[in-house]
Amino acid sequence: MPLKKFNSQKNINMWKYQPFLPLLSKANRISMGEGQTPLVKSRSIGPALGIPDLYFKLENLNPTGSYKDRFASAFVSMMKSRKQDLCIATSSGNTGAALAAYCAAANIRCIITVVDGAPDAKIKQMQVYGASMFMVKDFGKDPELSAEVFSLLNSFALSLDLPLPVSAYCYCPEGMQGVQTIAYEIFEQTANAVRHIFCPAGGGGLTLSLAKGVMEYGHRYQLSGLPRVHCVQPEGNDTMAGPLRNKENVAVQRARSTTAVSGLQVPNVLDGNEVITACRSLGGTGYAVTDTEVFNWHKKMAQQEGIFCEPAGAVALAGLALAVEKGEVADGEQVVCLVTGSGFKDMLTVEKQFSLPALEAIDKAAFAVWIEKMKKGKI
């Protein structure tokens, strides 16, 4: 019996959710298979926490290794539809890598200014895709200087009649519509059964995307009992998680971000106020976690679940652990934690946190001795 023709292009990217996305012709959509990422049930950590129905949304498996590919696909597609041939961007790493890749696919020149201290692996990834790069000292660390540098970039972009692709609703709502597709996928993958979604936050764009996505999907399909969306931040960059938990309405700008978790070092408010409003409307709250907790869960995710993410990808799980400790998640509730980026994005931090030993070559005789010991159960 002949096999049916397999359509390898059917529903393999986020553009299956076209009704929720910018209205663009297929000819202008720049896609590399972003989205439709796996939702994997926890085998060890969930049961150990008393949450047997814990799932990880593996956004680290997007084309360039992070959820920012959804943003880049939507944004670069918009650029192509407007016949723009230059992208001027700023990034802490993942947005830049995604934009560099999608601009390469669209034959658009890409110039990226990265924050001071951006992981070298992310910088090299952008360079491999052909992006021109700049790093400004203390950009992303000092709020006043960061605002000045950002103003220079924004003025430069405006002088060329170009948008500045910052992954935040306050700057680029069209691109963030792509990120909202994470929520739509979670609804479909859990058959609407999910009760809690934990999101890591720096400037708040991702958390706001999930909250907006939950509300828009729920409204369109008239769903009841929508999941709670929770905002999790490192204590060293707590701009909105604390205010959200403390029933305050305004996010707080920090003098300086002190967290070592790359990608979440955003002391400015950005989407913070909207995050507080949106999460609260869904019954969500905020969790501020220590860097130590993040790095501990980061290691456990790799060694107990086989999930190799960058430290920022473990922040949501650290928040869930705190929620369990506070008795704010019941054991019968289905929970999703977002895993935002690949561990290969920040290998220097991985090497430091895991204390990985150097691997030295041994001779054949020594290897044979080791094999014999293994056979006898002596190792």
Image: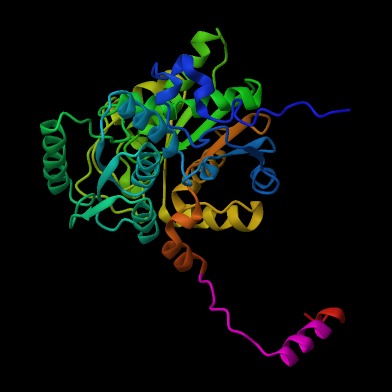
Question: In the orientation shown, which residue stands out farthest toward the top?
Answer: 222
The stretch in magenta equals 355-373
Location of residue 360 in the rendering, given as x and y in whole percent from the top left corner: 58, 83
Residue 363 as seen in the image, left or right of residue 112: right
Residue sitting at x 21%, y 54%: 134
Identify the image quadrant of the C terminus.
bottom right
Residue sitting at x 35%, y 61%: 120
Location of residue 151 in the rendering, given as x and y in whole percent from the top left corner: 12, 39
Q: Nearer the viewer, residue 369 or 246?
A: 369
Q: Nearer the viewer, residue 168 or 236?
A: 168
Coloration of the structure image: rainbow
Location of residue 224 in the rendering, given as x and y in whole percent from the top left corner: 57, 11
Q: Is residue 279 visible?
A: no
Question: In the orientation shown, which residue stands out farthest toward the front?
Answer: 2
Q: Is residue 132 above or below residue 23?
A: below
Q: Is residue 294 visible?
A: yes
